[in-house]
Amino acid sequence: MDTRGWTDEQLVFAVANAKSWRGVCRELGLKATSAGMLRSVKRHVERLGLDTTHFTHQRAWSDADLRQAVNGASTWTDVLVQLGLTDRGESRARVKGHALRLGLDTAHLQPPPNAPCRPRYIACVR
């Protein structure tokens, strides 16, 4: 063990078994509320090239789940159903925002047929 307090092997195990960055810290016996500790752990995870796509954070679905749902859906409602969510405005906005952050192609997703047009748009495309 070095001055970090954990080995690369322990970090690999922690990342594989956790569902969030804080979970990784807890697995390593670290203070999960320390922003500095979280940054340090993230740096080492990036250095090792570890996969964190299974992290759900406070969601019930992972980035990989969202990718799969978007790729297999024709509407945003389909995406939400695939993720086990109710199609409410807040759920849809959260999922859309996350898809945007991930850079997913969502051009093929259509709004539901009864979705109201927002007044700020000149034309509503269905």
Image (cartoon, rainbow, N blue to C red):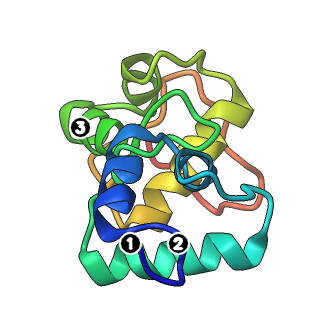
Determine the secondary structure under disc 2. helix
Q: Quadrant of the C terminus?
A: top left
Residue 91 against residue 11 in the figure, above or below: above
Amino acid at circle 1: Val
Depth check, front residue: 5 or 100: 5
CB atoms at circles 1 and 2 under 8 Å apart? yes
First along the sequence among labels 2 and 3: 2
Estimate how packed mark 1 is, as few (under 14), some (14 to 19) or many (20 or more) residues with alpha carbons within 10 Å. some
Q: Which sits in the foreground, 17 or 111?
A: 17
Location of mark 3 (residue) = 68
User: Disc 1 on helix, strand or loop?
Assistant: helix
Q: Identify the residue under disc 1.
A: 45
Which disc number belongs to residue 70? none
In space, the residues marked 1 and 3 are separated at their CA atoms by 24 Å
- The residue pinned by badge 2 equals 41
Does the image show residue 40?
A: yes
Left or right, 66 with respect to 33, comes to left
